[in-house]
């Protein structure tokens, strides 16, 4: 659930304006992948990786991104699919490095036959995993110092946001909505761990199996959360008014006290540098609930 167009013509070799490897860090090995020289033509099939590449300053090296990579706006969007990657369509961009969040269809093996390296950057389990991925992407693209700086800055920013948010004076619970069928997330999920740092109780904990259980409307009404976070505002048009219109939901404390918070679906489902923005949105909601 954490992985979330238009046409693009094939770029020419001259389109790449990647800077030469000034750091002298190549070859580098990340996991089982060894990258011999600074990649000049990167294809990103991960929206989170795309955001990170541009934050690192590696944007000029990117020749194509998948159809879900809508941020930043200047990324070279294409109709490449992150969910059903086509090796032939990817190869048309003549990449020297391809980034994916998972590789269930054997994409890396198919591209390896043409000499293209594929780096798999899976969804992180913890914040430390996300910070490590920033640093790894920096090393992989010839921006090691920038990657380490980005990881350090994100860690410091989130720590400061948490430290600057007073813990609730009384127990404060929340419901985090992924879609209108009441799929949610627990405190052990990646986003759940971020929210847990603010001292909130998650109404999905113990209510199902796995990190992303499906709750029932009856359960949510019974536990009466003080905060509701909506991660389905863009995909599904949910907002405080639509929530209040659900049968019985106007009795919830979160609805009555106007503590239903709409989040940007993309920020709430990716693990790029904008996780800091997610932490800030959670902090603002907690502060508002305590006023």
Image (cartoon, rainbow, N blue to C red):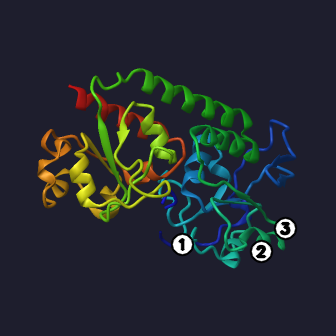
Whichever of labels 2 and 1 marks the residue nearer the N terminus, that label is: 1
Mark 2, Cα crowd under 10 Å, few <14 / some 14-19 / many 20+, is some
The residue where tag 1 is placed is 79
Mark 3, Cα crowd under 10 Å, few <14 / some 14-19 / many 20+, is few
Q: Look at the numbered disc 1 and give the secondary structure of its residue.
A: loop
Whichever of labels 3 and 2 marks the residue nearer the N terminus, that label is: 2
Residue 145 location (% of width, % of height): 71, 32
Establish if 218 lies above or below 7.
Answer: above
Q: Which mark is residue 22?
A: none
The residue where tag 3 is placed is 115
Q: Nearer the viewer, residue 22 or 144?
A: 144
Mark 1, Cα crowd under 10 Å, few <14 / some 14-19 / many 20+, is some
Q: Is residue 214 toward the left or the right of residue 125 in the image? A: left
Quadrant placement of the C terminus: top left
Residue 127 location (% of width, % of height): 57, 39
At 24% across and 39% down in the image, what residue appears? 226
At 25% across and 47% down in the image, what residue appears? 223
At 22% across and 45% down in the image, what residue appears? 224
Q: Look at the numbered disc 3 and give the secondary structure of its residue.
A: loop
C-alpha distance separating marks 2 and 1: 19 Å
C-alpha distance separating marks 3 and 2: 9 Å
At 27% across and 26% down in the image, what residue appears? 170
C-alpha distance separating marks 3 and 1: 23 Å
The residue where tag 2 is placed is 110
Choose top left, top right, bottom left or bottom right for residue 83: bottom right
Front of the two marks 2 and 1: 2
Residue 13 location (% of width, % of height): 74, 63
């Amino acid at each position: 659930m954490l992985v979330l167009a238009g046409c693009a013509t094939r770029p020419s070799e001259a389109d790449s304006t990647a800077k030469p490897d000034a750091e002298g860090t190549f070859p580098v090995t990340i996991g089982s992948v060894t990258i011999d020289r600074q990649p000049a033509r990167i294809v990103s099939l991960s929206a989170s990786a795309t955001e990170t590449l541009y934050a690192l300053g590696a944007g000029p090296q990117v020749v194509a991104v998948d159809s879900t990579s809508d941020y930043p706006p200047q990324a070279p969007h294409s109709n490449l699919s992150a969910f059903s990657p086509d090796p032939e369509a990817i190869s048309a961009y003549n990449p020297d490095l391809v980034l994916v969040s998972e590789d269930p269809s054997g994409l890396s093996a198919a591209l390896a036959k043409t000499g293209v390296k594929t780096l798999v950057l899976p969804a992180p389990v913890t914040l430390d995993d996300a910070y490590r991925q920033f640093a790894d992407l920096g090393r992989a693209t010839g921006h090691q110092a920038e990657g380490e700086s980005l990881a350090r800055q994100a860690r410091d920013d989130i720590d400061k946001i948490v430290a600057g948010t007073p813990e609730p004076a009384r127990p404060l619970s929340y419901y985090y909505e992924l879609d209108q069928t009441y799929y949610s997330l627990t405190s052990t999920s990646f986003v759940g761990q971020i929210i847990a740092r603010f001292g909130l109780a998650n109404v999905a904990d113990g209510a199902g199996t796995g990190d992303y259980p499906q709750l029932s409307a009856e359960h949510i009404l019974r536990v009466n959360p003080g905060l509701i976070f909506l991660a389905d505002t863009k995909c599904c048009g949910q907002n405080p008014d639509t929530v209040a219109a659900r049968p019985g939901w106007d009795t919830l404390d979160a609805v009555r006290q106007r503590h239903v918070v709409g989040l940007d679906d993309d920020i709430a489902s990716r693990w790029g540098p904008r996780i800091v923005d997610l932490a800030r949105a959670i902090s603002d909601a907690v502060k508002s609930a305590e006023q």
